[in-house]
Image (cartoon, rainbow, N blue to C red):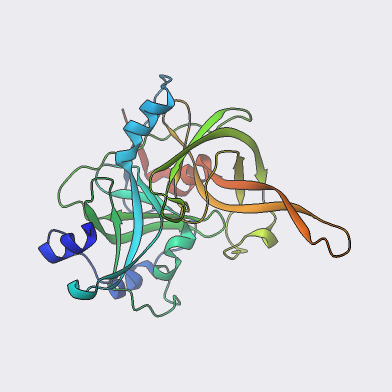
Amino acid sequence: EALREGFMSGKESKSKTIKEIRAASALLVDEKEPMEAVTALKGKSKVIDGEEIFKRRKRSVFIFGKILSSDPKALKFDLSGTAFAIAGDGVCITNYHVLKDLIGKDGPASKDSIYFLMSADKKIYRIDRILAFSQNNDLAVFKVDTHGEQLSAIPIGRPANTGAPVYCLSHPLGHFYYFSKGIMARNVAVDSLSITYGYNKNGKAPVRMEITADYGVGSSGGPILDKYGNLIGVVTSTHPVGTQGGPGAGSYIQMMVKETIPVKALIDLLGTNLNYKR
């Protein structure tokens, strides 16, 4: 209902079309830092409890969606992922696999009329342009039209150590703003054959941070936070671990490994165009 009201009232921004965004993103090079500077917040150092982390970061996290038909009388949309802001001027992060249809000249033809973000208070922001991406580390940096407002940005933290507490804020299959807690289980290098969304042999070696905080389908692109409320990773995928039973017994899933992208991969992608402010 919020989407219908927003598009019918004309309050949503009038940004570039999908064709324009795709044409511009076709000029981007995988793993190359963005042409424009990204001014992010430097990580905080005061420990805060889970309730306060959720309260502060909820404003920074968005529902990622696609309008399939912009006819107000038959509005169709798909809420397919999660994204979050790292700069007040509209620079946001999600997964490469969430935005891959917009990246590159060889992307499949799309009938989607609008890619958008929706905030917790039902504000709608259209995607304006893609700034950078990493296929192997499943990251996409993009910018939205903020209507002249300042977004609430998540500060950039330091890489987490094994055993450190972590939080995930995302939207697993319609469970919007689901907040879970766990620990950092391990940092690993990933074999190219296990990259779910394709491997670029010319890209950087893929790295992952495995955590125990819960998430699922729809959480893609969600932020992983430390005990200070800083960004330390980005949700990417899950992998089941199981065993084959006896004859006729079938297989059993014993645990689900939660793979995220460590914050260092994002820092490396932004490169020398990453500036900090307190």
Considering the image in quadrants, where does the N terminus appear?
bottom left
Q: Residue at x 28, y 45 (%)?
A: 120
Q: Nearer the viewer, residue 172 or 10?
A: 172
The x, y position of residue 87, in whole percent, is 30, 42
Q: Note whether residue 41 is visible.
A: no
Rendered position, 241 above or below 158? below
Considering the image in quadrants, where does the C terminus appear?
top left
Position of 3 compared to 230: left or right? Answer: left
Q: Nearer the viewer, residue 22 or 238?
A: 238
Q: Residue at x 38, y 51 (%)?
A: 83
Q: Quadrant of residue 197?
A: bottom right
Q: Note whether residue 8 is visible.
A: yes
Rendered position, 182 above or below 48? below
Looking at this view, name the residue that lies furthest to the front.
248
Rendered position, 230 above or below 109? above
Query: Number of numbered discs present?
Result: 0
